[in-house]
Image (cartoon, rainbow, N blue to C red):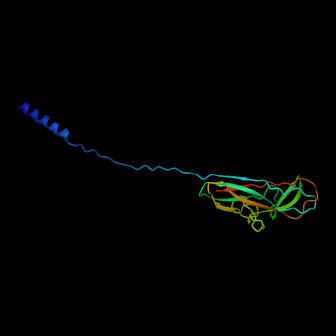
Amino acid sequence: MKKILLAVCALALALGSAMPVSALTTTANMSVSLTVIPVASVSVTNMSFGSVTPGAAVSDTSATITVNVTSGSVYTVTVDAGTHYLVGDKYRNLQSGATSGGGYVLSKDSGFAAPWGDASYANTFDGYATGVASTGTGANQTLTIWGRFNGTAPSTAGTYTDTVTVTVNY
């Protein structure tokens, strides 16, 4: 009887191991991402009204702003009031030491109808002059900044300067 019981147990064990075993599983999804942040660069050529004699007319001039912003990124280029700006004045100012050399305007067009400024950003230039908005292409984009001196050259000889900051807001 023992032998029969052992044989039945052995047969049951053999049949049991031949049967498929069902395992329980669970799953989860993993999100995979890459974020590309926009980047920008800006450069600007210097602007010179040239060399003139005291009291002479001063010619209009221009400079070039070169902007490179990641493709598809919206940006605005602004120009601040400059180092020698007098609050409430509609002109930026050139200065030689403590001597004022007169005012000048910076414009987005050669007709001087659209002044450059930084309204809605730093707001240093009376809040009415704005920047230029565009969308980046991933390649260099150029903008012209036009300059016009207000009046004639100062009567005192000297080199009159100002520094304005060009900013890309993106």
The residue at the far top in this view is: 3
Q: Quadrant of residue 151?
A: bottom right
- Left or right, 45 with respect to 72, comes to right
Nearer the observer, 124 or 137: 137
Looking at the picture, tell me which residue is in the foreground, 120 or 167: 167
Which residue is the extreme one toward the left?
A: 1
Q: Position of residue 68 (x, y in %)?
A: 66, 54
Establish if 57 lies above or below 11. below
The tally of labels here is 0
Q: Position of residue 109 (x, y in %)?
A: 75, 65
For the point 20% across and 38% down, which residue is it? 17
Q: Is residue 153 above or below residue 20?
A: below
Name the quarter where the C terminus is drawn.
Answer: bottom right
Q: What quarter of the picture does the N terminus occupy? A: top left
Please tell me in which quadrant of the rendered image residue 48 appears. bottom right
Relative side of 9 to 49, left or right: left
Of residue 68 and residue 18, the one placed in the foreground of this image is 68
Q: Residue 117: give x, y in percent of width and height.
A: 74, 62
* 113 lies left or right of 159: left
Q: Position of residue 164 (x, y in %)?
A: 77, 55
Res. 137 image quadrant: bottom right
- Measured along the vertical axis of the image, is residue 83 above or below residue 24? below
